[in-house]
Image (tube, helix red, strand yellow):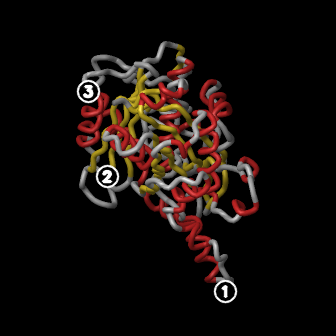
C-alpha cells in the first residue's frame, strides 16, 4: 500500500501560501532580511503579523506557531479537497522549539512583575500544535506532537507512512511549525558561532559557503498524506508518492552530532532502495560541519552519478523543525513544474566547487527527489518523494 500526498499548505518569511512560495523558488528570491542584534548584524526570515489570517477572535489568543499551522492546514485540506471526518485521521505535527518563544516572553513578563495571560499555559504546550488542528476540524483520532530537533517535520512524515501502511489510519495531517526567533534561542546560538554574523555590509551567505553560518527563519507547512486507494477513490490529483523515509539517531551526544556523517549516510542508503533521485534537496545550511556531512554523503553514494544537489536555505533560511516540510513542499513543486530550485550564496567555498551544486534554476524533467535533514543532538532523516503515479 502506497502513501501519497494530495494536499499541501505553507506560510513562511514573505510568503503566505503555495502560489507565493512557487514564485520564490522559480524566481530565486531571497526572503531573508538583515537586522541588528546584540551589537552584530544577522539575517532572519520572520513571518509578519499581516501574513497570518485572523479567522476569529478566539484564534487571536493562540500563539504564533499555532496560528501559522492552522493557516497552512486550511490551505492543505482545501487543496486536497477532502472532508477529514469521513476518514480515520491522525494529526502529526513536528517542532523543534514548540512554544519556546511563549515561555521566554512569559518569563520576561513575570520578571518585570507583570501577569501572564490564562492562555499562556496552553500556548507554551507543544501538544497544542496538534490539538489545535484536531479541535479546529473536530477530529477525534490520533493527535501527536513530535519534538525532534530540526528533523521534526521529516520524522512526522515517517510516522505517518508507518500508520498508513500498517492500516491504522486512512489519512494523516502531517505538519511542522516554528517561531523560534526570540532572545532565548538567538542568544543560545551566538556562543556556538553557528549564526551568520557580521557588520552592516555583510552579504547574505548561503549554503556551502565554507562555514559562514546560517540564517534562522520561521513558518509552518502541512501535507495531506493518505492511502493511495483512498485518493484514487476520491479521484483527486496525487502530488507525490512517499516512496521511502528513513530516520536514524547517531547517539553521540545531546549537544552535538556525528561530524563524520556515517549515520546520515546510512539513513540515506536505507532510503534509496535501489532508486536514484533526479536531484537532492539538501539541508546544507552554511555551517561547516553540516555542509561537510552533506557532501560526505554525496561522495559515498552519488559522486559517480553526478546527481545535482541544491539547498533552498539561502532563499528561505532555516526554520528548524519546519525546514524539512519546506523542502518537501519544494520537492512537490519541482515534480509538478519540472525544475530544480537554485542554491544562492555570493560565495560558494572552493572545496564544494567540485560538486554539481545547482547555482541557477535548472529546467528538466523531475521524477523523484531526495530530501535530507539532520539536527542538533544527532537526529538524521531523509525522504524520497516521487512523481504522482510513479
At x 46% / y 62%, what residue is drawn? 191
What residue does disc 1 label? 113
Tell me the distance, in whole angstroms, between the alpha carbons under discs 2 and 1: 39 Å
> Looking at the image, is 27 positioned above or below residue 158?
above
Q: x%, y% of residue 390?
A: 40, 19
Q: Pointers 3 and 1 in contact (CB under 8 A)? A: no
Tell me the distance, in whole angstroms, between the alpha carbons under discs 3 and 1: 58 Å
Which numbered disc covers residue 273? 3
Give the left or right position of residue 196, taking residue 31 as reference. Answer: left
Front residue of 253 and 139: 139
Q: x%, y% of residue 67?
A: 64, 55
Residue 32: quarter of image: top right
* Label 1 element class: loop
Front residue of 298 and 159: 159
> Looking at the image, is 317 positioned above or below residue 357?
below
* Marks 3, 2: nearer the viewer: 3
At x 53% / y 59%, what residue is drawn? 131
* Label 3 element class: loop
Q: Quadrant of the N terminus?
A: top left
Q: x%, y% of residue 33?
A: 66, 45
Q: x%, y% of residue 207?
A: 48, 37
> Looking at the image, is 122 positioned above or below residue 132?
below
Q: Earlier in the sequence, mark 2 or mark 1?
A: 1
Neighbour tally class for label 3: few under 14, some 14-19, many 20 plus, Cα within 10 Å:
few
Residue 30: quarter of image: top right
At x 23% / y 41%, what residue is drawn? 262
Tell me the distance, in whole angstroms, between the alpha carbons under discs 3 and 2: 23 Å
Q: Earlier in the sequence, mark 3 or mark 1?
A: 1
What residue does disc 2 label? 378
The answer to whether any part of residue 145 appears in the image is yes
Amino acid at each position: 500500500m502506497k502513501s501519497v500526498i494530495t494536499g499541501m499548505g505553507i506560510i513562511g518569511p514573505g510568503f503566505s501560501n503555495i502560489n507565493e512560495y512557487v514564485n520564490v523558488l522559480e524566481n530565486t528570491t531571497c526572503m531573508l532580511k538583515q537586522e541588528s542584534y546584540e551589537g552584530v548584524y544577522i539575517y532572519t526570515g520572520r513571518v509578519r503579523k499581516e501574513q497570518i489570517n485572523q479567522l476569529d477572535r478566539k484564534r487571536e489568543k493562540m500563539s504564533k506557531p499555532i496560528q501559522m499551522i492552522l493557516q497552512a492546514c486550511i490551505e492543505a485540506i482545501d487543496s486536497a479537497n477532502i472532508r477529514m471526518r469521513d476518514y480515520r485521521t491522525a494529526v502529526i505535527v513536528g517542532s523543534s522549539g514548540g512554544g519556546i518563544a511563549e515561555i521566554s516572553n512569559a518569563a520576561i513578563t513575570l520578571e518585570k512583575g507583570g501577569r501572564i495571560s490564562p492562555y499562556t499555559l496552553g500556548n507554551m504546550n507543544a501538544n497544542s500544535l496538534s490539538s489545535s488542528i484536531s479541535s479546529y476540524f473536530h477530529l477525534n483520532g490520533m493527535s501527536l506532537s513530535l519534538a525532534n530537533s530540526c528533523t521534526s517535520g521529516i520524522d512526522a512524515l515517517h510516522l505517518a507512512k508507518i500508520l498508513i501502511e500498517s492500516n491504522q489510519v486512512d489519512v494523516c495531517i502531517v505538519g511542522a511549525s516554528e517561531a523560534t526567533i526570540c532572545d532565548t534561542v538567538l542568544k543560545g546560538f551566538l556562543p556556538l558561532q553557528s549564526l551568520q554574523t557580521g557588520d552592516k555590509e555583510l552579504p547574505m551567505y548561503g549554503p556551502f559557503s565554507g562555514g559562514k553560518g546560517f540564517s534562522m527563519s520561521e513558518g509552518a507547512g502541512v501535507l495531506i498524506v493518505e492511502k493511495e486507494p483512498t485518493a484514487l477513490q476520491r479521484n483527486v490529483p496525487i502530488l507525490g508518492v512517499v516512496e521511502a523515509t528513513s530516520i536514524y539517531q547517531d547517539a553521540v551526544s545531546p549537544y552535538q552530532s556525528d561530524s563524520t556523517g556515517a549515520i546520515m549516510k546510512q539513513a540515506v542508503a536505507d532510503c534509496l532502495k535501489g532508486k536514484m533521485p533526479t536531484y537532492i534537496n539538501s539541508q546544507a545550511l552554511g555551517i561547516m560541519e553540516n555542509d561537510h556531512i552533506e557532501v560526505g554523503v554525496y561522495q559515498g553514494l552519488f559522486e559517480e552519478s553526478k546527481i545535482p544537489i541544491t539547498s533552498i536555505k539561502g532563499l528561505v533560511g532555516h526554520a528548524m523543525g519546519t525546514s524539512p516540510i519546506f523542502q518537501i513542499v519544494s520537492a512537490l513543486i519541482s515534480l509538478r513544474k519540472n525544475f530544480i530550485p537554485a542554491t544562492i550564496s555570493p560565495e560558494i567555498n572552493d572545496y564544494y566547487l567540485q560538486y554539481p551544486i545547482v547555482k541557477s534554476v535548472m529546467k528538466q524533467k523531475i521524477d523523484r527527489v531526495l530530501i535530507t535533514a539532520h539536527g542538533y543532538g544527532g537526529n538524521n532523516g531523509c525522504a524520497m518523494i516521487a512523481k504522482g503515479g510513479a
